[in-house]
Image (cartoon, rainbow, N blue to C red):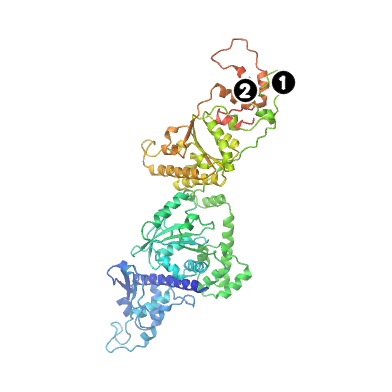
Amino acid sequence: MDPIADRIFRHLLQRIRRLAVLDLYQRASDVGLLSINFPFGEKKMGIAWQVSGAAASGLAGDRDRARRLVGRVLKRAPTTLHDGFVDHDNSEPISPAVMGMRDHTAVTWVQAKHTDAKAKTSPRKKGRTSAIYPNGPRPLDTPIMLALLREFLPPPNPMQVAVALLIARAFDQSITDLGALRDVLMRRNPVVLIKIPVTGFERQFGAMLEEALIAPFYAELTDIRGDRPLSERFGDARPELRKRKIFTGSGRKVTDLGRQDLIRYLSAAILGDAAPLVIIDETSAPVRPEITAVADIVLNCEGIDQRLVADLLHVCLGIPATLSCSIMETMSFEPNSLGVGDLALAVRPGRNANTVLDLLATLAEAAGADVTEDDDKKARRRRSSNPLSALRDKPKAASIDMILPEVDLSTDATADDPKTAVSARPGAAAAPRHQVRNLRVEHLSGYGEAKPWARDLKDDLALWREGALGWDEMSTKMLLSGPPGTGKTTFARALCNSLEVPLVVSSVATWLESGYLGDVLQQMAATFETARQHAPCIIFIDELEAIGSRGGGRGGDDRHEHYWTSLITRLLELLDGALKTEGVIVVAATNLPERIDPALLRSGRLEKHVVIPPPDAEALAGILVHHLGSDLAAVLASAPERTEPPDPERPATHKLLSVPVHSKSSVGDDAISEGQAHA
């Protein structure tokens, strides 16, 4: 291991052992072997342990007898130590053991000059005898008691050791100057990014931060999003101790954030209280550029490999690293899919190298299969094993529908001639079906200002593609409103064909399907992100009125006002982002425009508002022409001759003769227009 990495790992390993010693002393005080006092006046400032009076007299005498009694009280056997995790304090036991955090300084250990050998061989002073053993054994003193207790230290936690090894490796691959690292960490708000693609690394790293296993102080973790802490603990770890604040960010939890949201969270952290910001990313996805820009230190390394497994077994089980490596070579073992939790399952005291490595190989194979398994199948399996899990599991983002523009199948040039009319002469040949063109804005009738807007957008889009027009100079957002069945969805599909760009179809009802605020926001962001990836593209948002308006309009029920305000605010941010994202066109539809928040209709958002009325007589004639297609001539020819005078109040049937074949208006019912457009 590189000298820097070795130095970092040994430091972290000593901190892991230190916590194990403190927990052991606390356990000993609970069963009466030690007594506690507070040398600095309060528990948060520091704790000192001393042998209790009962233990000092009751364990006096033979050391082996005292060891057996201590093990019986603690209900554990002595630990077999090895060179990977040596009890260095046996040479100089602590007297008394003091955990101090005075004036926010690092935890210190007060070392005594006594040794176990000196304690054994030192002459007994005259007249100093035990009250229980008046004829000989002296009472057990604190240094000997603490050294005896440390023989019962539990084996190292493999998850903590694995994280320490990964951190040391990240330092090895990313840091060349420890002096520069120290200078960065001394700043008011240092930002550290640690990217290690190992499942469970984020949670374990957060837990070790809280327990002072990484930084030289206990930490209070504050997520930049206000979410659960990185350790995912519900309660405060060691609430009786003094802590320092650390801002944290999870790489898994920022993937669904919009750019502006992420910038806002990062800015609040680095410009707020004087506290470091630590961003831990265990995903394999690239780091977002906003995080890379703010990071002062970037530590990264690959996942778990054979060398790390060998070092882990050496530290936790005392198995020589060379033996583990030779066994893994014969197994063709690939541990890169293992997570931190997998190591805890297999690396157990008393197991030999072959057993542990066989178990790790099985877990690695299962982890690799789990990555490729379909998400829906996994969710069904979880629900079948535990029906209540269906109530707790959050749904994944729903699939997003995308419609590609249709190819124009017309091959007859006369179909583009607006003067071409249908012949009503009996026996006239019907227009061939290949002349029926697909649904386009140019073939619609009605729609008021929406059609000129679409034609202008088509011309502007051609100029933008040539680089002759800026995207911010174009009108690319519109709201269509009108009663149900007036063809709002049909217009969006016709616009898709006219502009020859994909159409992303969504609705507020689809966004709200899961109900959970986080999932709804994620689905909204995914819709706009899909359009951005396929730009130039159209987003069609139906049922916009369902998102409502801020500050009222929900029957006076303001209990969930924060929920709806968050949705509207997020939609405003997405619309603003779409304005700055070249190639994203937004068309929204609503039946109740008066329920829409006014901020959504301001300049730069859905600023173009077109009201679509029910179709008039001319539009209805266009709808008939569209659906009859090449059969129109035969239908008109079969009409009976009019024998009564025409009613001036009723539209004349002969007006259909003046409607061109190619003018396929579809202003009528959406279901008819979409389902029978090519009948």
Question: Could you say which disc has been placed on residue 659 in the image?
Answer: 2
Q: Is residue 274 depicted above or below 495 in this figure?
A: below
Looking at the image, residue 174 sits to the left or right of residue 643; the answer is left
Q: Amino acid at mark 1?
A: Ala
Measure how far apart labels 2 and 1 are at the Cα level: 17 Å
Name the quadrant containing residue 596: top left
What residue is rendered at 60% in x and 67% in y?
333
Query: In x, y percent, where is residue 388?
Result: 47, 50
Looking at the image, residue 496 sits to the left or right of residue 97; the answer is right
Q: Secondary structure at mark 1?
A: loop
Q: Is residue 138 depicted above or below 345 in this figure?
A: below
* Visible residue check, residue 541: no
Quadrant containing the C terminus is top right
Query: In x, y percent, where is residue 392?
Result: 46, 50
Q: Which residue is mark 1?
A: 428
Question: Earlier along the polypeptide chain: callout 2 or callout 1?
Answer: 1
